Image (cartoon, rainbow, N blue to C red):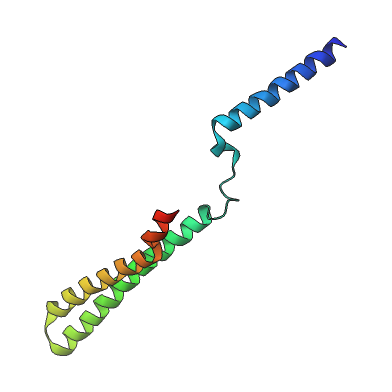
Amino acid sequence: MEKDAKKKQLDSFDKKLQDFESRLNPSKKQNHAQLPGGDGELWRFVLRSGVELFSAFLVGFMIGYGLDYWLSTRPLFIIIFTILGMAAGVLNVWRIVKPSDIVSK
């Protein structure tokens, strides 16, 4: 009988301790992989942003290279269209992020 009372007391204490820990640090209780917009959403965003930046840079560079080859003005159009491509990539990532959505959350 004494063992049952001690076991109930320990179970009660364990439950109180778990409740206290969950109130103290609620983020430990949540599983981030199951949350909507968790780690998978972050990786998808990072990969898409990287692809947008790189592809815009590459397209700008290739257009500049083609124009320089065609017009025999070697570095001029490569520089201009590479800068324009990088600016377009940043603009595309800016559209993905939508800063107004971040502020409203």
In which quarter of the view is residue 55 placed?
bottom left
Find residue 94 and report its horizontal and vertical position in percent: 34, 64
Q: Identify the residue at image location x=57%, y=55%.
A: 36
2 relative to 23 in the view: left or right:
right
Residue positioned most to the top: 2
Residue positioned most to the bottom: 70
12 relative to 37 in the view: left or right:
right
Find residue 92 and report its horizontal and vertical position in percent: 34, 69
In which quarter of the view is residue 67 placed?
bottom left
Where 47 falls versus 58 (above or below)?
above
Where 12 falls versus 97 (above or below)?
above
Find residue 72 and report its horizontal and vertical position in percent: 12, 86
Q: How many marks?
A: 0
Q: Identify the residue at image location x=26%, y=73%.
A: 85
In which quarter of the view is residue 53 placed?
bottom left
Where 21 falls versus 74 (above or below)?
above
Q: Choose between 56 and 96: the one closer to the eye.
A: 96
Find residue 73 and report its horizontal and vertical position in percent: 11, 83
21 relative to 96 in the view: left or right:
right
Q: Identify the residue at image location x=53%, y=52%.
A: 38
